[in-house]
Amino acid sequence: MSASDRAELQRIAQTVDINRKRMEALEQQISRLEQIRIEQVQTIETLAAIPPEGAKGAMIPLGSGVQIIADIPSNPGVVIDIGSRVQAENTLSEVFETISKRGEELSRLIENLTEEFNNLEQETLVLANIFNEQIAELQGTEPELFGNVAEETPTSPETVSIPTESKTKRRKRKRGTEFTLDD
């Protein structure tokens, strides 16, 4: 194996590793954005459930299983974050419109990141196959290919399975040391 072959194989391996790390970061980012989108949908549903005449004794969730009982007047003012931790009071219809626009922007961003993820995955598969073919050539064996590049790419990052060099071993917890919802 010549020095240039080794350098090329090392470059391919580094690029695959960098792509894999970037794909993991994209997966995490997409997951966080999807959580935000779910929160927005829940907010719209909650606000839509407020009757036009208001509500007496409504339970408003504060988080961590805590709720406060409050009276909601008809046509209530709703406080919404308008950016940089600045909040403003708006009408229900204005809040619906604002959250809907934010949701559309978020959906477009998720689509763009998913497309970027899929493109990066394709590039990584091509490089991994080139790497395996070159190694097999040097060793005189049949190459192990990672997926068919001509096949359809997965539509979501959750369906991706890029092989890793080694499996990480998980430690088992002893009985009685795991956290539960009651902790």
Image (spheres, rainbow, N blue to C red):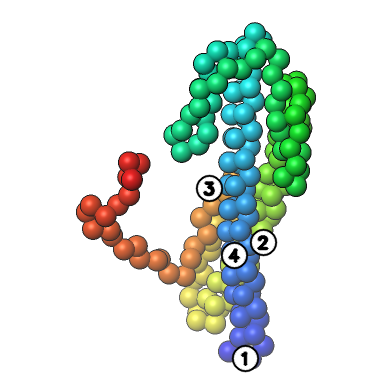
Mark with earlier residue (4, 2): 4
Q: Are marks 1 and 3 in contact (CB under 8 Å)?
A: no
Q: CA distance from mark 1 to mark 4?
A: 29 Å
Mark with earlier residue (2, 3): 2
Mark with earlier residue (3, 4): 4
The residue that appears at 62% across and 52% down in the rendered structure is 29
The reply to whether residue 102 is in sight is no
Q: Which mark is residue 159?
A: 3
**Residue extending furthest toward the top:** 53
1 vs 3, front mark: 3
Q: Residue 121 falls in which quadrant of the image?
A: bottom right
3 vs 4, front mark: 4
Residue type at mark 4 is: Lys
Q: CA distance from mark 2 to mark 1?
A: 25 Å
Rendered position, 109 above or below 56:
below
Residue type at mark 3 is: Thr
Residue identifier under label 2: 123
Residue identifier under label 4: 21
Residue type at mark 1 is: Ser
Q: Nearer the viewer, residue 27 or 87?
A: 87
